[in-house]
Image (cartoon, rainbow, N blue to C red):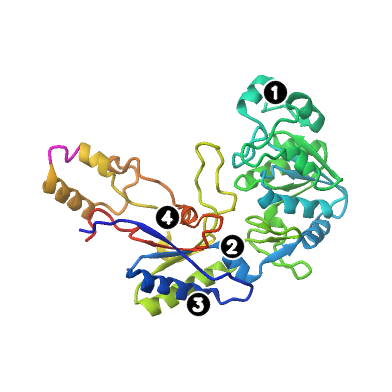
């Protein structure tokens, strides 16, 4: 029986630039790591690579002027509402600047007391003490300041995001409301900036009489004046690149993962799965912030990563079916049960409490935590033993 289960290794790459052969560079780096560190490859190992370097190799960037041009083409005149943006300078500030540059006037509607992923404008305690009803009350900036003042700073960044967004352009006004229909009192033209709730928000606005509604995945879906683009996700998944440009979510990722899987199979003799990952899908229990600001954890992966785990709960079996067994008898009984488990354990008591999430979400979260978002320099992660279990030899 193996004595080690899942391992995740961060793999260093050189600095990636537009036009680099990322398939070849990644394969070389993974194989060099194996040679240097003395580990072998196995079938169903997983190589995951962050979306950031894929997009960089593609040169998938857009400037503020290019974003503004697309906004102006789709909203030629009048006031544009921007609904429920997340409170992130990295994720949204440049998008907001580009949108404001392309519109006559902009009204930003922020949700409160926090945004979609948990960034707070102010605390729940402050909300309770204020007497404000978050289900119905619409707060202008003046009303917000009257009630909450100027001491509402983000606990991690120290930013006053109402002030920050308002000052991105003189044509911006900020309101706070949790009902998306509140924006229609200001304009019938709306850009939905929420991420995971955007389809419901679009539907509710259209039913309430909005004249034109786009989510961020309706902008930069094709090249504008030579820009990068993403035909599926538009501006979702973008990050600040420079003070005047953003890096977009990568495109054509299916071709990339399949090409990398093919070259790894040729060079290692093993069937290695490959995926592109972005933000992990997990929530910080202290700050209350949900990590997933990308539209999906993984925009592309090889077919072997489809599905969800199908696992038995060892703790449950140890305390029930095998509670009278000890030592090698308990171990062998557990291995035998695992080897004979059904192909689909959904709803079965012996699987209750196992993680009912997609494999790509779990693997992407593991990869994101392993590589980090700072200066580790390991945008590739090699995961081994993930599909092993207690019965694997």
Residue ID for mark 1: 132
Which badge, 4 or 1, comes first in the chain's sequence?
A: 1
Residue 272 placed where, x, y %?
Answer: 39, 69
373 to the left or right of 188: left
Tell whether position 321 is magenta: yes
Badge 4 marks a residue whose secondary structure is: helix
**Circle 2 residues within 10 Å: few <14, some 14–19, many ≥20:** many
Question: Nearest the camera: 65 or 299?
Answer: 65
Q: Residue at the far bottom: name it.
A: 266
**In this orientation, does residue 209 appear?**
no
Q: Nearer the viewer, mark 4 or mark 3?
A: 3
Residue 227 placed where, x, y %?
Answer: 73, 67
- Residue sitting at 81 percent across and 44 percent down? 167
Cβ atoms at labels 2 and 1 below 8 Å apart: no
Badge 1 marks a residue whose secondary structure is: loop
Residue ID for mark 4: 359
Q: Quadrant of residue 21?
A: bottom right
Residue ID for mark 3: 24
Q: Which residues are magenta?
A: 320-325
Residue ID for mark 2: 52
Which badge, 4 or 3, comes first in the chain's sequence?
A: 3
Q: Nearer the viewer, mark 2 or mark 1?
A: 2
Quadrant, the C terminus = bottom left
Distance from the alpha carbon under mark 3 to that under mark 2: 17 Å
Q: Nearer the viewer, mark 1 or mark 3?
A: 3
12 to the left or right of 64: left
Distance from the alpha carbon under mark 4 to that under mark 3: 26 Å
Which badge, 1 or 3, comes first in the chain's sequence?
A: 3
Q: Main secondary structure of the magenta part?
A: loop
**Circle 3 residues within 10 Å: few <14, some 14–19, many ≥20:** few
């Amino acid at each position: 029986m193996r004595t080690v289960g899942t391992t995740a290794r961060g793999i260093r790459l050189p600095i990636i630039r537009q036009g680099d052969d990322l398939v070849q560079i990644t394969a070389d780096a993974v194989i060099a790591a194996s040679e240097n560190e003395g580990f072998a490859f196995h079938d169903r190992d997983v190589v995951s690579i962050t979306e950031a370097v894929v997009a960089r190799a593609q040169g998938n960037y857009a400037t503020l002027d290019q974003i503004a041009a697309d906004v102006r083409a789709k909203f030629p005149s009048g006031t544009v509402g921007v609904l429920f943006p997340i409170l992130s300078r990295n994720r949204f500030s440049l998008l907001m600047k580009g949108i404001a540059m392309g519109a006559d006037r902009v009204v930003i509607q922020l949700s409160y007391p926090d945004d979609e992923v948990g960034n707070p404008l102010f605390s729940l305690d402050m909300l309770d003490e204020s007497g404000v009803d978050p289900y119905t009350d619409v707060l202008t900036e003046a009303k917000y300041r009257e009630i909450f003042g100027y001491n509402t700073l983000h606990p991690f960044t120290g930013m006053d995001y109402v002030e920050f967004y308002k000052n991105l352009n003189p044509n911006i006004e900020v309101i706070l409301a949790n009902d998306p229909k509140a924006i229609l009192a200001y304009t019938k033209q709306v850009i939905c900036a929420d991420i995971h709730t955007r389809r419901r928000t679009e539907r509710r606005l259209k039913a309430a009489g909005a004249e034109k509604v786009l989510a961020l995945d309706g902008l930069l879906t094709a090249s504008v004046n030579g820009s990068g683009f993403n035909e599926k996700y538009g501006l979702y998944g973008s990050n600040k690149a420079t003070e005047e440009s953003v890096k977009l979510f990568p495109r054509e990722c299916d071709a990339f993962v399949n090409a990398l899987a093919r070259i790894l199979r040729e060079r290692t003799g093993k069937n290695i799965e490959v995926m592109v990952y972005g933000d992990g899908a997990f929530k910080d229990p202290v700050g209350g912030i949900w990590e997933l600001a990308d539209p999906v954890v993984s925009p592309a992966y090889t077919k072997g990563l489809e599905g969800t785990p199908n696992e038995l709960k060892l703790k449950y079996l140890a305390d029930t079916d095998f509670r009278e067994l000890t030592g090698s008898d308990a171990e062998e009984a557990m291995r035998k049960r695992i080897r004979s488990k059904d192909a689909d354990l959904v709803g079965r008591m012996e699987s209750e409490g196992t993680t009912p999430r997609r494999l790509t979400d779990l693997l992407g979260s593991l990869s994101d935590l392993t590589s980090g978002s700072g200066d580790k320099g390991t945008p590739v992660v090699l995961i081994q033993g993930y599909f092993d279990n207690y019965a694997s030899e």
